[in-house]
Image (tube, grey):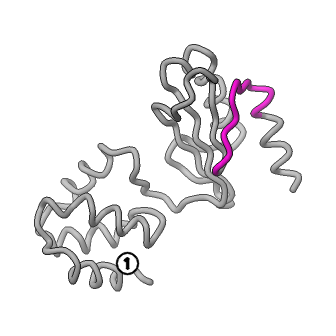
């Protein structure tokens, strides 16, 4: 489904009022995997909200993406417990190895990277989520091994 078709379908479900903005953005992201610039433009025209304001709302919430998702999703926790136990070093390694920053996808589309405030496993810090699998008591060496093993598949 193209963004234009998806927006047309949403017009039937939502009234296009300001309070519909977040649910509309969530639906568009469910359809497309991320918020495409043309979708934001269409939403702006339909809801009569500036594109800048829509970007302002969407960038406030960590759930919204502006790049296509990767085949594999890596989330690195930087909540207090994970941060003090090495989460920043793991994130730094991920950025260097994958050559991307949080919120981006590798050029080959294989990985996307996100930093998150909490994965809910503070006692097991630091924690990394690779797709739907959680890795506890992570270290730079363990994370490097996970990437190496995935690269060899």
Count numbered badges in the picture. 1
Q: Is residue 32 left or right of residue 75?
A: left
In the foreground, 121 or 65: 121
38 in relation to 80, above or below: below
Q: Which residues are magenta?
A: 132-143
Quadrant location of the N terminus? bottom left
In the foreground, 60 or 41: 60
Whether 4 is among the magenta residues is: no
Residue at image mark 1: 3
The residue lying at 13 percent from left, 74 percent from top is 15
Residue 118 percent location from the top left of the image: 48, 32
Q: Residues within 10 Å of mark 1 (few under 14, many from 20)?
A: many
The residue lying at 64 percent from left, 50 percent from top is 132
Quadrant location of the C terminus? bottom right
In the foreground, 145 or 80: 80
The residue lying at 53 percent from left, 49 percent from top is 104
> Dividing the picture into quarters, in which one does residue 108 lie?
bottom right
> Residue pushed farthest top?
84
64 in relation to 101, above or below: below
Residue 75 percent location from the top left of the image: 58, 41
The residue lying at 58 percent from left, 23 percent from top is 88
> Dividing the picture into quarters, in which one does residue 23 lie?
bottom left
Dot 1 falls on a residue whose secondary structure is: helix
């Amino acid at each position: 489904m193209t963004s234009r078709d998806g927006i047309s379908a949403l017009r039937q479900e939502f009234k296009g009022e300001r309070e519909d903005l977040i649910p509309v953005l969530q639906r568009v992201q469910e359809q497309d995997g991320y918020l495409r610039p043309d979708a934001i433009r269409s939403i702006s025209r339909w809801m009569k909200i500036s594109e800048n304001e829509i970007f302002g709302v969407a960038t406030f919430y960590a759930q919204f993406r502006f790049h296509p998702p990767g085949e594999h999703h890596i989330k690195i926790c930087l909540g207090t417990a994970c941060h003090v136990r090495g989460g920043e070093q793991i994130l730094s390694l991920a950025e260097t190895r994958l050559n991307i920053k949080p919120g981006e996808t590798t050029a080959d589309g294989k990985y996307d990277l996100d930093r998150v405030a909490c994965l809910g496993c503070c006692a097991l810090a630091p924690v990394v989520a690779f797709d739907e699998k959680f890795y506890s008591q992570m270290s730079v060496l363990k994370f490097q091994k996970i990437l190496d093993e995935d690269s060899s598949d």
